[in-house]
Image: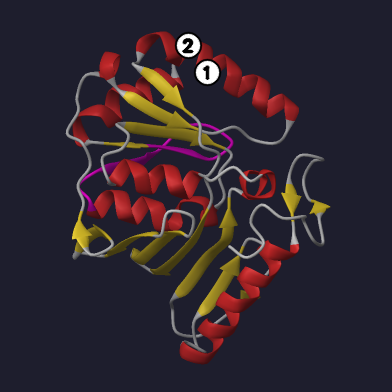
Amino acid sequence: MDRFGGPARGLEVKSTATDMVSDADREAEGAIAELLAAERPDDALLGEEGAGERGSSGRRWVVDPLDGTTNYLYGFPAWCVSVALEDADGGVAGVVHDPWRGETFRAARGAGADLDGRPIRVRDHGDLATALVATGFGYDPERRAMQAEVLRRVLPRIRDIRRAGAAALDLAWLAAGRLDGYYERGLNPWDWAAGSLIVTEAGGWVEPLAGEPFGLVAGGPRLVGPLRELVES
C-alpha cells in the first residue's frame, strides 16, 4: 500500500512486454516466504516470483504475492494477495486479501468461506442469459486473439462481462455473490489455488475447461455446466 500509486521500482518484464513484475511483487513474496519458513519449515512452497521449497510434510503453500500487477502499477484498484495451502487431497486453506478495500476472503476445507468473518455464499443463479460473468486475458497476442473469439461467442448469450484483471479477486468476488460466473484459460496454480477453494467452500463449483492451455470455469451449481458448454463450444 505504501508504494501503490507511486513510481514503480525494479520494474522488469517476464513472458511478454506487457507481463510486468516489480519490487513490490518480489518483496511481498519474500515477506510471505520468510514467515512460512519460520512457522512451517517442513512445508513446500510455490511462489509466482520464483520462491520455492521442496518440503517434506506433504503440504505445499501456493503464493501469488501481488495478483493484478498491471493494475497495481497503473494505480487501478483491483489487485490482491493470494495464499493457499494444499495437501494430497487438494486445497486445505485459502486466503485472498484485498489491501485497497481492506477485505479478506478466507476458506478452510469443510469449514465454509467468509469475508472478514462473515459467512459468504455464491449466488444460486441458473439463467445464463442474465448471468454476470468475469473473465481474464493472457499476455501472449495469439492467445488473446483466441480469447477474443470466445468472448465474441459468449457475450451475446449472457448479461455482461466484467474484466478486473486479477483472477484471485474474480474468484473471491464470485464466492461473495458479486458475480454469477467466471471462466479463464492460461492460468497458473497461484492464480486460482486460494480462490477456487473459497468458491467451493461458499457453495460453488469449479471445473476444468477441456483442452489447452489450462483453464477453469466457476459459478453456482446450476450455472457451471451451461457456462462451460458455452465457453468450450
Residue with the most extreme top position: 156
> Where residue 197 appears, x then y in whole percent?
33, 56
Tag 2, which secondary structure?
A: helix
Query: How many neighbours does mark 2 have within 10 angstroms: few (below 14), some (14-19), or many (20 or more)?
Result: some
Q: Residue drawn at (43%, 42%), measured in percent from left and top?
A: 170
Question: Split into 4 quadrants, where in the image is the N terminus?
Answer: bottom right
Which label is found at residue 150?
1
> Where residue 194 appears, x then y in whole percent?
41, 58
Amino acid at dot 1: Val
Residue 207 counted in the magenta span: yes
Using the rendered view, name the quadrant where residue 155 is placed. Answer: top left
Q: Residue drawn at (56%, 74%), measured in percent from left and top?
A: 45
Tag 1, which secondary structure?
A: helix
> Where residue 232 appears, x then y in whole percent?
44, 22
Using the rendered view, name the quadrant where residue 223 is placed. Answer: top left
| Residue linked to disc 2 | 153
Amino acid at dot 2: Arg
Task: Classify residue 104 as left or right of residue 43.
Answer: left
Query: How many neighbours does mark 1 have within 10 angstroms: few (below 14), some (14-19), or many (20 or more)?
Result: some
Describe the colour scheme in one phrase.
secondary structure
Q: Which residues are magenta?
A: 202-217
Is there a contact, CB below 8 Å, between mark 1 and mark 2? yes
Question: Split into 4 quadrants, where in the image is the C terminus?
Answer: top left
Q: Is residue 102 above or below residue 220?
A: below
Which label is found at residue 99?
none
- Which is nearer the eye, 228 or 155? 155
